[in-house]
Image: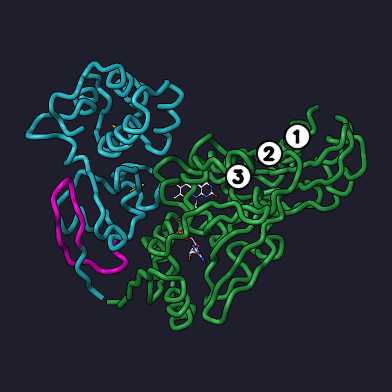
Amino acid sequence: MREVSYFAPTEVGEAVKLLAQHGEKAAVLAGGTDLVAQLNYYEIKPSALVYLGGLDLDYVREEGGKLVIGAGTTIAHLLTDDLIAQKFSVLAEAAATHGSPAIRTKATIGGNLGTASPAGDMIPALMVMDADLVLASSKGQRTVPIQEFFTGPGETVRTAEELILEIHVPLLKGKAVFKKLGRRKAQVCSIVSTAVRLEMDGGVCKDARIVLGSMAPTPLRCSKAEAMLKGKAVDAALVAECAAQAVAESTPIDDQRATAWYRAKAGTALVARALAEVAGI
Amino acid sequence: MKQILSFILNGSPVDVIVTPTETLLDVLREKLGVTGPKRGCDDGDCGTCTVLLDGEPVRSCLTIALTVAGREVLTVEGLSTDGDLHPLQKAFHEHGAFQCGFCTPGMLMSAKALLDHNPTPSRTEIREYMSGNLCRCGSYEEIIEAIQVVAAGEYAPSGGKE
Ligand SMILES: Cc1cc2nc3c(=O)[nH]c(=O)nc-3n(C[C@H](O)[C@H](O)[C@H](O)COP(=O)(O)OP(=O)(O)OC[C@H]3O[C@@H](n4cnc5c(N)ncnc54)[C@H](O)[C@@H]3O)c2cc1C
Ligand code: FES
Ligand code: FES
């Protein structure tokens, strides 16, 4: 029988040392809502489990004009946290669509980033705020802008020796919303999702972010669509044009959840709704 | 690498030898003979393995057993006290909130967590909170009804646990 070791470090230093020792053979275990299903079905066969639950990474703080979110913060915590509700409500909106209560009590934001699914629901909200991810290894820490973190489905720039430690979220101005379309309201992977943020000055858009989920190999920032809005008066016609452009930048696929054709149609409608809502039209 | 796991199960301390990849569901069912929590999918989707960990609902199939060291686990076996059914159990029974019963252990644990957090939930709140528990027999209406009558105080706790 395969021998697997289990470690439950209580300090980050200890955790990264274990990752340095075990490298690719170690699996980092946070809430386990992705990882344990993979273990149960023998999709992964790590030789060591490094459980992060003892590291006290479940926190949300405001520091120097930023929100600092520990990687071990559960989705349930995001949903009830006052700072998140007041300063980063788009993340709370996304958290409300995540799984169901018994998933949210364990699933973490760090695990959502670690899984790196194009459908990961916390990711678009973090992307519209230009979040930075702090990665730690036995050699030190580095900060990666979320925009540069994902390289493909399930793939990121994180090395096997690194831990996602925390997420730094600048409190950018403007209004943001998250919208998700799934086969039902609860416990679904999105067919398409979007987060948008607009900073408006009167009716004119000063800054824009548009992110699509489940429409490309990674969550996708639609920069051409964003550029269409900047400096313009936002009206219904521009919103429609911009939503079509956002989807034109994506590369949706056919899968068991929906066809590419449907994703493009629904995605355009979803982005248009989100933009209209934040622009107040 | 086998290890001894100690935790509180339904109010009593237990020690059990487990391996690192065994889940709480594996250990409950196969090592401790606690077969209330069912294995419907082993994937987190169905909810019938739901137990309370320190009072919060979790999927026992997605919980590595060793991570519950020192913590309190409540399964459906721990709901009744001295043979006296929990109000939710009585309500499920009397309102026919099941057919085959396979989903019931998970439904009861989720319902208990809901009422512990929110003693008077609206119908929408009940539907939302119970959204991760699937019933292949389609007893959803009766399940909602049973939770509503307990919330309305119809089966006031008779010395049962909580
Ligand atoms: C029924 C069900 C419904 C779901 N619904 C949704 C949904 O609606 N939206 C959604 O986005 N997801 C959903 N998920 C997927 C899952 O819940 C999320 O991806 C969750 O955020 C994963 O977090 P976790 O803590 O459970 O991660 P784990 O399963 O513990 O880990 C996930 C991955 O990330 C790595 N990892 C975890 N933490 C770190 C860290 N700090 N540093 C480095 N690597 C790390 C792990 O090694 C693993 O590869 C659902 C899952 C289930 C079972
Ligand atoms: S067996 Fe755990 S959710 Fe189905
Ligand atoms: S009663 Fe049969 S699954 Fe719910």
**Residue at image point 21% right, 64% down:** B5
In the picture shown, does residue B73 fall above or below B136?
A: below
Mark 2 falls within which chain?
A
| Discs 3 and 2 carry the same chain letter | yes
Say which amino acid is labelled 2. Answer: Val
The residues colored magenta run B6-22
* Callout 3 amino acid: Leu
Residue that badge 2 annotates: A177
Percent x, y of residue A192: 65, 44
Residue that label 3 marks = A91
> Label 1: chain?
A
Mark 2 or mark 1: name the one nearer the start of the chain. Answer: 2
Observer-nearest residue: A159 or B12? B12
Circle 1: element type? helix
Closer-to-camera residue (A36/A201): A201
* Protein chain holding label 3: A
User: Does B25 appear above or below A7?
Assistant: above
